[in-house]
Image: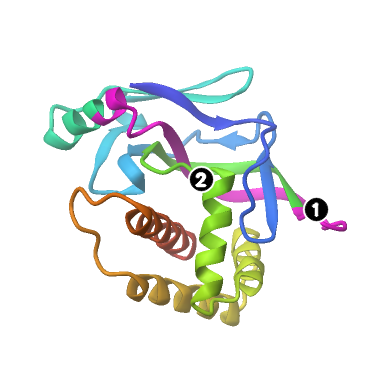
Amino acid sequence: MGSPGIPYNSWSEDLGGFVERVLPGAVRYEGFDVVCCRDHEDHLVLGRLSNGTLRLAEGKKGLNYECDLPDVSYAHDLVKLVERGDVRGSSFRFTVLRDEWIPARGSSPARREIHELQLFELGPVTMPAYPQTVVGLRSLLRKVGIDTDRLGIAVRRVRSGDPTGEDIDVITKTIASLRQLLPAPRQGAEGPIAEAQGRLELARKRLELLINY
């Protein structure tokens, strides 16, 4: 299984008051045992750099990855989901080593250019963050009283490596709110409620990853 893993010069969706892009040559992984996981779940490991089951290669448009899938049930399930088109994208976890912030202007959000990052995990994900998904998510959060602007500031500071105690508290409380917001989804459920649950669960996972690494 292979896929473009980290696109270069491609602006992200609105991440809560700012957008970001990774510049060519920014990714560092030498000396670090990068792993490939499904949906950022460490117990669903698919391959790793040190044993050769995960391979990374620089391309003109970004960092590409290729993974030899293990002979386990969740990997077999993943193949079927990719073939059906249920799993279409990839995502990655990283630590920013060097970046540059460009202030917001008018209706345009602040922008961050990542000049150097340390990669430690990447892999296929069920719900890549498309712009329309994030817009819908922010609307949901606001309806339940979550200050998305304040959350965006907290996320920016954590990503920059200089968070305050209040920033961590804001993110932690948001995670707790997301856990309580909707009941557990029924297996095979479809429709607006199931879609909303998926968005909220994705947001919760991303925030947990942000403060745990």
Residue in the foreground of this view, choosing between 84 and 113: 84
Q: Amino acid at mark 2?
A: Ala
Q: What is the residue that sits farthest to the top in this orientation?
A: 60
10 Å crowding of disc 2: few (<14), some (14-19), many (20+): some
Q: Is residue 156 left or right of residue 205?
A: right
- Is 190 placed left or right of 143 in the picture? left
Amino acid type, residue under disc 1 in the picture: Ser
Q: Is residue 74 visible?
A: yes
Tell me where residue 68 appears, x and y as whole percent. 27, 22
| Residue 34 shows in this picture | no
Which quadrant: the C terminus?
Answer: bottom left
Q: Answer with mark 1 or mark 2, whichever residue precedes in sequence.
A: 1
The residue tagged with tag 1: helix, strand or loop? Answer: loop
Q: Label 2: which residue?
A: 129
Quadrant in the picture for residue 125:
top left
Task: Indicate left or right for 20 with 2 as reference.
Answer: right
Q: Which residues are magenta?
A: 81-110
Of helix, strand and loop, which one carries label 2?
A: loop
User: Of 3 and 142, which appears nearest the observer?
Assistant: 142
**Residue 87 point in image, percent of width and height:** 35, 34
Residue 89 painted magenta: yes
Residue, x 18% and y 52% (percent of image)?
187
Residue 30 point in image, percent of width and height: 50, 33
Dot 1 surroundings within 10 Å: few (below 14), some, or many (20 or more)? few
The residue closer to the viewer here, 15 or 6, is 15
Give the residue pinned by disc 1. Answer: 108
72 with respect to 197 (left or right): left
Of residues 152 and 43, the one nearer the viewer is 152
- Total numbered badges shown on the rendered structure: 2
Looking at this rendering, what residue extends furthest in the front direction?
A: 191
